[in-house]
Image (cartoon, helix red, strand yellow):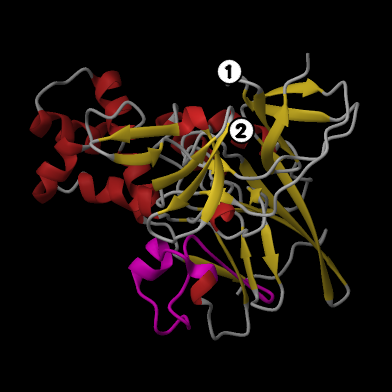
């Protein structure tokens, strides 16, 4: 069990998914003499998985940086086992896969030779991932990539790195579990919110901002300051979207999260000029979805991405992240981690 550092501050981030530039931005916010915890999924889905893993490897050389493994990181180790050549081959042609990026660096086409060479050239990264812990405990906090199966003793590797929907499963320990793996937008019910979710009653903090999981995500980092016997939380986030000043007030409305993966199959109930009223097939929830985000194939309709239901309240002079600005009549923006629609200004 770890104890808080002398300055009583720790920082936790997860699910970087190849976003080295955003991780560097977050690391720049970490105060000197603090602990930094990186709790898994450094690779896959983003543009620079290899660079990100190299950066995490360098960060880990500090005695104040602690790293746990995630399911995507563990999948790389599996793919590099000689007996898993089919699994290895299946991941080679995905541009956002670290194996694809390694293949381009090494310029080797034969998969058997490539697998062998990766294990040699990137031995330091393979050994690094193989050495990682599955969780850390510091004071009253248990830090893990995905979650636990009620207790630590009942949990195995799959629970630690791959348990889905942990927030709704809960746990039976005295710790506050801090985890990533599942985007927080899937847990917020009344708004599409990528922000860190802190539930002191459940003793769970979820920090995965959905970066590269959808086109709406961000990279989150939780700052915890210990003060006497209590803890003060501060949320940080960064994203890839352009920032824009708003010139007029916008009145928000709506009280539902909207459509989230994996519930993309829809039944269209009514279509207006800009939005359609739809019901999700899996959950029977009714949402408003932008018309351009509906695709129908063989008499079945689907959302092509996550789609917030709400319209945001924005004040004149606010700065927002502009996510989508190429749709008719409305733009999708984000303020304080919450995504929603605003009417385009004339």
> Viewed as shown, does residue 127 lie left or right of 167?
left
**Res. 14 visible in picture:** no
Percent position of residue 323, x then y: 62, 28
* x 39%, y 70%: residue: 159
The residue pinned by badge 1 equals 326
21 above or below 299?
Answer: above
For marks 2 and 1, the one nearer the N-term is: 2
Residue 130 appears in which quarter of the rendering?
bottom left
Q: Secondary structure at mark 2?
A: helix
* x 55%, y 49%: residue: 287
311 above or below 41?
Answer: above
Residues in magenta? 138-167
Percent position of residue 138, x then y: 65, 70
Quadrant of the image containing the N terminus: bottom right
Query: Along the line of sight, which residue is nearer the eye, 330 or 111?
Result: 330
Q: Secondary structure at mark 1?
A: loop
> Viewed as shown, does residue 133 lie left or right of 276?
left
Tag shown at residue 22: 2
Furthest-top residue in this view: 346
């Amino acid at each position: 069990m770890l104890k808080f550092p002398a300055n009583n501050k720790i920082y936790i981030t997860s699910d970087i998914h190849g976003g080295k530039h955003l991780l560097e931005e977050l690391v720049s916010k970490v105060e000197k003499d603090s602990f930094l915890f990186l709790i898994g999924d450094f690779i896959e889905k983003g543009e620079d998985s290899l660079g990100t893993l190299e950066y995490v490897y360098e960060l880990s050389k500090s005695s104040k940086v602690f790293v746990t493994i995630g399911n995507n990181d563990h999948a790389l180790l599996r793919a590099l086992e000689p007996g898993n050549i089919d699994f290895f081959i299946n991941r080679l042609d995905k541009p956002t896969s670290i194996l694809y990026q390694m293949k381009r660096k090494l310029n080797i086409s034969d998969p058997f030779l490539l697998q062998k060479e990766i294990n040699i050239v990137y031995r330091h990264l393979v050994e690094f991932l193989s050495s990682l812990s599955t969780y850390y405990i510091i004071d009253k906090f248990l830090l893990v990539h995905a979650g636990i199966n009620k207790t630590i003793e009942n949990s195995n590797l799959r629970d630690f790195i791959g348990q889905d929907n942990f927030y709704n499963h809960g746990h039976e320990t005295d710790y506050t579990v801090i985890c990533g793996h599942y985007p927080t937008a899937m847990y917020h019910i009344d708004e599409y919110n990528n922000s860190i979710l802190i539930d002191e009653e459940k003793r769970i903090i979820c920090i995965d901002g959905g970066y590269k999981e959808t086109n709406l995500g961000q990279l989150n980092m939780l700052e915890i300051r210990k003060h006497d016997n209590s803890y003060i939380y501060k949320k940080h986030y960064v994203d890839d979207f352009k920032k824009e000043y708003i010139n007029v007030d916008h009145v928000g409305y709506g009280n539902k999260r909207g459509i989230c993966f994996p519930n993309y199959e829809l039944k269209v109930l009514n279509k207006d000029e800009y939005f359609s009223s739809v019901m999700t097939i899996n959950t029977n929830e009714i949402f408003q979805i932008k018309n351009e985000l509906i695709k129908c194939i063989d008499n079945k309709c689907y959302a092509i991405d996550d789609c917030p239901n709400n319209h945001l309240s924005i004040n004149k002079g606010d700065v927002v992240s502009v996510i989508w600005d190429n749709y008719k009549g409305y733009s999708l923006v984000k303020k304080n981690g919450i995504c929603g629609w605003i009417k385009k200004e004339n």
